Amino acid sequence: MVTKLGEFDVIARYFRRPARRALLGVGDDCALLGPEAGQQWAVCTDMLVEGRHFLAGTDPRHLGHKALAVNLSDLAAMGARPHSFLLALALAQPDPAWLEAFSGGLFALADEHDIELVGGDTTRGPLNLCVTAVGLVPEGLALRRDAARAGDELWVSGTPGQARLALGHLLDEWQLPQPLLRQVLPRLEQPQPRVTLGLALRGIAHAAIDISDGLLGDLRHVLDASAVGAVVDVDALPACEALSRQPTQRRRACQLAGGDDYELLFTAAPARREQVLRAGEQAGVALTRIGSIEAEPGLRLRDGAGRSMPADYPSFDHFLQP
Ligand code: ADP
Ligand code: MG
């Protein structure tokens, strides 16, 4: 006999776990969290909508991972330590296999970061996954977008562009050979938020942002918030094997404008270079210097030979060209 799952069965069976650090977790009208002396709450929310942020039929385990990962990436970009999270979920129907896999992916990443689900909301509707994450950062140490200073060096973690390269393959914009696809697909489906790096950069970096919307677009947010400009050496951008095998224009488009990279872009004084590199080692991620912050507003792109390139290059539409 098939028993139908109700809203409260879904919550109890797939999302309710005993509270640990929360004073009160799932089950009441609100969760209760205990503030810690000298710390500030960092709070963010990010929604994943089917058809907009992911393709229909995406592995639910990956969706569970990613719904939380994109939020932990925002905490990482502030230098905040993840504390707990909430989940607002709209589902067309409560499919046990889907829920099992989704909650499995979600809690696997939560356990990796030792954080707990403290509440949420569950409703029928088009598939929509919204996580709200809560983190802690010591007073005054948050890595804010408005803190870049002229003279800072500009750094990026990892190899941006991989997620966009994988997406292009899924959308039939180009074809990647299987071995290369296997290298980049996990960056799209199961991004690893740079939480350890964000923590290691406290007190060292000035401004930071995660480049979920593409490197140049997100850099512009930092420049605007900080009222400064930047010069970026496009040929200094790190490339993995799959990216380095692409035609130059496609590679640069992925690196500079590809979304869904959950790497950190940050600025730090040149005198901090050694400490920055040590933070990267602690976090187990390569860090690359890709430019510098200047007092003159605006974004200036140069190639390796020092020639200036159009600063609007490449826009998202360029992905449609070979
Ligand atoms: P309310 O009616 O007060 O909004 P609900 O009936 O929506 O509460 O939810 C009951 C409890 O279950 C609440 O504590 C809520 O935070 C929690 N909850 C609901 N949906 C989820 C979910 N998807 N994940 C975790 N907790 C949830
Ligand atoms: Mg409710």
Image: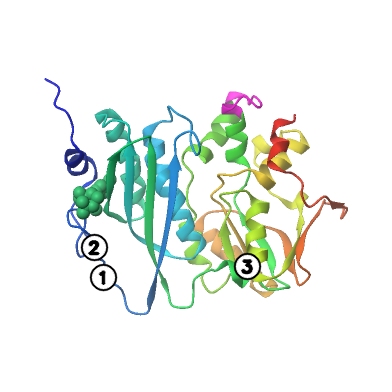
Among the two numbered marks 1 and 3 on one chain, the one whose residue lies closer to the N terminus:
1
Q: Residue at x 63, y 67 (%)?
A: 225
Q: In the rendered view, would you say 113 is above or below 270?
A: above
Does residue 244 appear anywhere in the picture? no
Q: Nearer the viewer, residue 196 or 3?
A: 3
Is residue 170 on the magenta stretch? Answer: yes
- Of marks 3 and 2, the one in the foreground: 3
Does residue 86 appear anywhere in the picture? yes
User: In which quadrant of the rendered view does residue 257 lie?
Assistant: top right
Q: Are marks 2 and 1 in contact (CB under 8 Å)?
A: yes
Q: CA distance from mark 2 to mark 1?
A: 7 Å
Say which mark, if any, is on residue 223: none
Q: In the rendered view, would you say 281 is above or below 173?
A: below
Q: CA distance from mark 1 to mark 3?
A: 32 Å
Magenta: main secondary structure equals loop
- Range shown magenta: 169-178
Question: Left or right of 313: which side holds 185?
Answer: left
Q: Secondary structure at mark 1?
A: loop
**Which residue bears the numbered disc 3?**
225
Q: Residue at x 32, y 79 (%)?
A: 37
Circle 2 crowding by C-alpha within 10 Å: few under 14, some 14–19, many from 20: some
Question: Left or right of 76: which side holds 105?
Answer: left
Q: How far across and how far down the image is residue 253, in percent?
A: 71, 41
Q: Residue at x 27, y 29 (%)?
A: 95
Say which mark, if any, is on residue 34: 1
> Which amino acid is tagged 1?
Gly
Among the two numbered marks 3 and 2 on one chain, the one whose residue lies closer to the N terminus:
2
Q: How far across and how far down the image is residue 79, in percent?
A: 48, 65
**Which residue bears the numbered disc 2?**
22
